[in-house]
Every structure is written in structure tokens, then in C-alpha cells.
Amino acid sequence: MFSYIVRRLLYTPLVVIGVLIVTFMLFRVVQGDVSAEYAGKNASAETIAEYRKELGFDKPLFINSEAASERGVLAVFDSQFFHHFKNAVTLDFGRARVSKQKVSSLLAEGAVPSLTLTVPMFLGTLITAVTISLFIALVRGSTLDTSVVVACVCGMSLPFLALIMFGQYFFAYKLEWFPVFGYEPGFAGAKYFVLPVLMGVFAGLGGDVRFYRTVMLDEINADYIRTAKAKGQNTPRILYRHLLKNAMIPIISKVVLAIPFLFLGSLLTERFFGIPGLGYLMVEAIGQRDFQIINAMTFVISVLFVLGNLATDVCYALVDPRVTLN
Amino acid sequence: MTAISAEPVVSTASAGRSLWYDAWLRFRRKKLAMVMLVIVVLYVIVGIGVASGWLAADWQDSVGESYAPPSWDTPFGTDIFGQSVFRKMIYGTKISLSVAFFASLLSIGIGVPLGAIAGYFRGYIDEIIVWLYSTLSSIPGLLLILAFAYALKGATLFGYKLDGITAVYLALGLTSWVGLCRLIRGEVIKHKNRDYVTAANAYGASKARIIFRHVIPNVTHLILIDFSLRFVAFIHAEVILSFLGLGAKGEPSWGVMIDDARLELSRGYWWQMAAATLAIFGISLALNIVGDALRDALDPKIRE
């Protein structure tokens, strides 16, 4: 177990390095020098050169042999590749193209509105889906069971984008039950979150209910359920005390894996409801063609995800002695 | 009790039948899945019809005034230019299906050989491939697709400037092979020690022959199941990418239609939105149900 944890810890930096190589390939090699685009259409050569310097495209991609011959051997690392790594480690992702704010502080500011949206959305989906699937497990094989499964597949087939647009139009714009759009920090802003959270829960239910239903069905035929029934225990007690406890392992692993995604926020929902979170920032960055924000976002969210995975795996290894790498 | 009495029936019935024929018989018993299969085939025919210029080639023609509501002649009304929304919906089938098709092709082309090689050779080759897919799978899905689509759009690869839709094919294909690769690797590791592989080894078959002629055909059904469910994800991803301006330009696709409908909706022109949603819903539902039925029919592990 100890060697497993050590190996798992050593593997984590390798994956982070991999993520940095992927983002380097995308934004430095495949996309290439965008300083002319940044400077604008009729920019002078000097302006373009300034942008080139600011964005670091003036340096060679991998090895700076020119600087090495002028400033000593160590200057060989004065290249885009090594700066890409250094910037990521020091969380220095440059400044946003339009607002000129630091990208790292934009990310930090976006986290709170995103979490305010995604945490209730996630908990709401989880609790509703687990409750529905518990009761569905009781009536397995019945018409009700079949119709819930059909409803789940229908829900999964609806495009989320269309759902948000129809929902916003109908409930906020037409019926005026909720504000259409907006954000305020603190509890005063809660009213803006109700509709987006409800829509997120609705959209997530299809897939989740189907997943948890399978989990519950695996458990409901187990001997301990029959014993509990034979003892004459009432149904809620069987469901919540026995079934749910045993179904906890797949539920928890799904929950832990979902946590890093909460930081990413909800790209489309935030965009439509004007919530200034990370998803909104990302959509805006795509529109403004700001590659530094996209690069920073990809890196930071991936690191959170990797760390979340690491924590889960180490916890499993501590609890379950059978766990090994692979 | 029922399991014992059912045993001889199953064994005599399946004697002399191939896995595929057997699966087809199981699949055919599901009426709903058969109906959905017909729907998928219809979508494919429409897609091919559009691509060959036989259907909806006249989508650019103005058929009436701007924003005419649905009527007998224009089943989903018209858009701002007076173009028939119905024709645009038909035309969009081509983009959606071609995205799903090319992305799947690329994803299978990368995932299957890499998975097979990793699983068969193990050692440091395996380590490198596993590292590669661990890296890609530690970047959350939508973020990864967006980053790829963003960087690839307008980029020049091997002297060829990528347009929007090619960037979408590449972004989806290059990011989605991970699951398939992991699956195939696991299966190949399992199959490597089976007798048929030992036998092929003993009569001197080359490694490439063992992998591609012996092992891969034994896992084809898993590729097919994976493919059917992945198709839906690709179709939905195209919608999001087009909406964010990273998709097709100059031709109608369902994502572009939904993007156009964003501003129309608040003015009460709901038909373009409804048409695109209906088209996406139809193919997704059909593929989801066909995919589930395929899995039930082909995977012996979950047979009851």
C-alpha cells in the first residue's frame, strides 16, 4: 500500500507535465504567433513587435542557442517552452487581451460565482437522482420503472443549449417567475440563481437517475435486503438504512470525481444568465480570441482535477488493501 | 431454477451461429430498438442525400417573407432571409452526421491501434501510451475540446489551412480516443493469454497479424457499442462548438440554427429553434436506444 501511494504521488507531476506539453503544443506550436492578430488590422511593425515581446513569441520555441552564445549557457532555456512551464508554476498567465487585468486574478474572481451556481446544482441533482432511483428500485420491472427509464433517455437526448434557451424564455421572460438575467454577490443575488440551478438539475437528472438506478438494482436483490424484509422492517428503513449505505461506494466515487468540474462552472448556463463565473470567462475569452485565458483555465482546472483524483485514490488505498496501480 | 432449465435451450440454439447473427436475433426482438434503427437509417439517407446534392440543395432560395410562421408550404416557417427553416434543418443533417462520422473515424483510428499496442507489448510502450491518455483524460472533456477547437481553427497543419468544420472534426477526434484506447488495452491484456493467441504465436504469426487479425476481431463488438453512444456526444458537441463560433461557417448546421435562434426567441420566432431541437432530439434518442439495445445484444456479460 505504501509503495502504491508513493508511486501514485510520483505519477502526478508527470501528468501535470503532460498537460503543460498539451497546452504548449496547442497554443504555441499549432496556433503559432498571434501577435499580429492581437495588434489589430492596421498596426505598425513596432506595435506588432511589442505584442510579440509581451506574449513571448519573440523567443525560439524550444532552445535559445542565440542567447546562449551571448549570455552564457543557462540562457539556452530562455525559450517559449521553458517560459510556458515557468509561468504555469508561478501562476503568471499574463494579462487579459481586452480588460488588461491579470489572468490569474480573473480566475480567482470567477471561482466564487461559479461555485455558487454549481454546488447547489450538483447537490440538487445528486439528492433528487438518488431519491428517485431508490424508489424506482422498489418497483423494478413495472410500467413506472420503464417510463422513468424512457424519460431519462429522452432527457439525455435533449440538447442542453435548447433547454436553457427555452427555459429562460418561458419561465423568466414569458411567465416572469424569475429574473431573466443578472448577478449580485451575497444573499441578495440568490434570486438570480434559482432558475439556472433548477435547469441544471433538470438537465443532469436523466443521466444520473439511470446511473444510480443500475447501482440500486445491483443491491436490491442482495441477501441483506431479504433478511431485513424478513425481519419485518418497514420500507423507508430498508431503503435508507440498508440499501443506501451499501450503495454508497459507487455514489461517493462518482461524487468525488465530479467535484473538480464544479470549479469550471457551467459554460452555457453562466453565459445565458449573466453569471460572471469561470464558464462566462471562458466563453468571453473564446469570443475575444484571448488564448492566454483559455490556456490558464485549461491548466488550472486540470491541476485541480489531478489533485482531486490523487486524493480519491490515496483514500481508497488507505481503506481498501486490494487497490494497486493500473 | 429457471436458469437450469434455460441452459440447454440456449446452448443448442446458439450452436453454429455467429456472434453477429445471434446478436441480430436478440436485437430484432426489441420492437422499439428496431423502430429507432429505422430512424437512424433515415437520418443517414438524408445526410447522404444532402451531401450528394439531391436534397435541400436549394436551401439558400427565399421561399417567402422574413420570419413567416409555420404553414403547409413551409413546415417550420422561414428565417430572417425568408429561407425555409425546414430545408435548413434537412441540410444540417449533413454537417452533424459528418462531424460524428469523421470524429468517430479518427477516434477509432487512434484509439484502437494504440490500445492494442499498449495492451499487447506492455513495458515502456505501454507506460508511454498510458501516460498520454492519463494526461488527456485529466483535462475536463468540454474544456479539452474547446482548447483543441480554438487552437486548431485557422491553424495551418502540413501546409493546409484548417477551416471551421475540419477543426471540429480534428478537435473531437483527437480528444475522444482515450476511452476507447483504455477499453481496447484492457481487453487485449485479457485476450493475450488466451489459447487462440498462443496457438497463433506457435505457428509463427507476426505480432501485427496477431493483433489485427486475431485479437481486434474479437473486440469489434465493443468498438461498435462505444461508437453508437459516442455519436450522440459528438452531435451535441457540434452544437456547442457552433454556438461558440468555433464550428461551421456559411452552411446551416443545427448548432448554427440554435445560435441564430438566440435572438429570434425573445421576439417570439420560435420555429427555427424548435426545428433544430427536434432534429437533434430525434437522432440522439434513436442512437441512445439503439446503442443500449446493441450493448444488450452484443455483450454476453449482461445477458439475463
Image (tube, coloured by chain):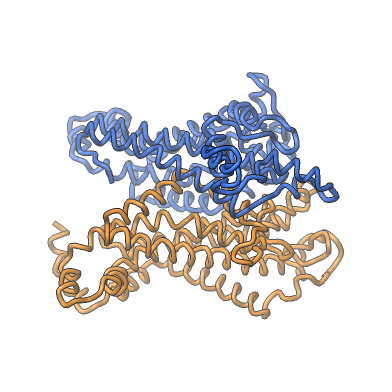
Question: In which quadrant of the rendered view does residue A247 lie?
Answer: top left
In percent of width and height, residue B302 lies at 28, 57
- Chain coloured orange: which letter? B
Residue in the image at 56% along x and 29% along y: A115
Is residue A52 placed above or below B227 in the rendered structure? Answer: above
The picture's colour for chain A is blue
Q: Nearer the viewer, residue B246 or B38?
A: B246
Which is nearer the eye, A79 or A285? A79
Which image quadrant is residue A252 in?
Answer: top left
In the rendered image, the vertical position of residue A114 relative to residue B204, given as above or below: above
Q: Quadrant of residue B171?
A: bottom right
The structure residue drawn at horizontal position 34% and vertical position 67%, both measured from the top left corner, is B221
Position of residue B239 measured from the top left corner of the image (x, y, whole percent): 62, 55
Rendering coords of residue B104 (x, y %): 49, 64
At x 59%, y 76%, the residue is: B48
Q: Is residue B230 left or right of residue B10?
A: right
- Image quarter where the C terminus of chain B lies is bottom left
Q: Residue furthest top?
A: A187
Residue at (69, 32) in percent of width and height: A177
Residue B198 is at least partly visible in this image:
yes
